[in-house]
Image (tube, rainbow, N blue to C red):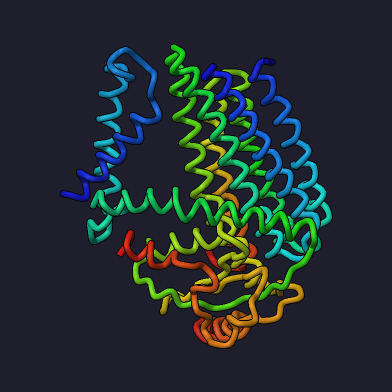
Amino acid sequence: MLSEIVDIIVYILLAIGVFFNLLAGVGLLRFPDVYTRLHAGTKCTTFGSIFICGSVVLLGLKYWIQGNPEYSTLSIHTAGALIAILLTNPTGAHAIARAAHRSGVAPVRAIVDDLKNKTVEKSAKKKEVKK
Amino acid sequence: MLAFVVTTILCFITYLLLTTGSGTLGLWSLEEILFGAILSLIVGFLARTILIKDNFRMANPVRWVIFIVYVIGPFFVSMAKANIDVAYRVITGRINPGIVKISPDLKTDLGITMLANSITLTPGTLSVDIDEDKNDLYIHWINVKKKALEKKPVDYKYVCGTFPNWIRRIAE
Amino acid sequence: MIEIEPTYLIVIGFLLLSIIICIIRVVKGPTAPDRVVGLDTINTIIIVGMIAFGIAEKSVIYIDVAIVYALLSFISTLFIAKYLEGGEF
């Protein structure tokens, strides 16, 4: 009885995870510029990964309790991979966004851009240092 | 010396987590434990000045408890909201973007890193650049509110809610 | 109730569909940062696919590979971003 409930929870988690991962792809296609694409690509894949990895951890725990101790390794390693994804994904997005802005890609349809003036000042400072 | 001990213990815990289910001594075998201890002693000696620079603020377990409460509670809820928000914008294509500057007034590097990562994963915002002198963040905001633009730099309540208060409790 | 492990193979099918959509963006992308965003998204989806394949095959080694792949793809993303920025290494 309990194992069937766990199975149903696993199916639900998988459905949510797959939906958000597909949404990331569709968002990459539909949004107009780099920054909005980063919104879709980072948030949706991270959220989808949490659910798919969570379902794997839950399934591993279920088999572990049912008497297969080798599944403990699978659960703990999946949790480690999930932590790695959670730490590295937003940092990578931050790096790409900064690189895009410094290489001169302006946000499309932006109504305010506080960073524009600051970039100019910084490049002027760099040139002075090089001279 | 204390930095060496803390680094060694962290390395040993990581090694033990990655080698569970290898033997009969609890979850581990004797060889794994011995080899892990030797390796983490070597790594702790080599990396003693890299991981911990000058203070031991994060060695306090209360901060870790607050961190876990923060991740499970407000952070996860706003992350779920963020994804529903992105789904709405993907389907309707209704965006109103802009880059704004906020000054959250955090002092440590760890705090500002945690805040930047939290902002990237929460509704409609993405950290683009940082002013390293004053620790100001530049945020790409997918749906700029007119009301928030009256004051410069923008009040952080509109962008990231109460996150800076939580992070001040964790990292400062 | 059907077996639960083969379901993960269906999940991998959907993830492949998502990767194909991302590849369209990588090929089309008007600027270089667009392509890097596409590649970064593909990396994350591949990590999740490796984890799903690991439990479908009941083998831990795929998940170990996924951890290492996550860290390596993070470093490669940082390097490409640094290159686009025009900074010195």
Is residue A42 in sight in this rendering?
no
Label total for image: 0
Residue at the front extreme, as displayed: A1
Residue B52 point in image, percent of width and height: 28, 54
Residue B160 point in image, percent of width and height: 51, 67
Q: Left or right of A126: which side holds B105? A: left
Image quadrant in which you'd find residue B42: top left
For the point 51% across and 47% down, which residue is it? Answer: A86
For the point 78% across and 50% down, which residue is it? Answer: A26
Residue C72 point in image, percent of width and height: 55, 43
For the point 56% across and 57% down, which residue is it? Answer: B121
Is residue A30 in sight in this rendering?
yes
Q: Is residue B120 above or below residue B34?
A: below
Residue at the left extreme, as displayed: B1
Q: Left or right of A50: which side holds B61? A: left
Q: Is residue B61 above or below residue B128?
A: above
Q: Left or right of A76: which side holds C32? A: right
Image quadrant in which you'd find residue B159: bottom right
For the point 30% across and 65% down, which residue is it? Answer: B172
* C67 and A102: which is toward the camera: C67
Residue B166 point in image, percent of width and height: 38, 62
* A58 and C85: which is toward the camera: A58
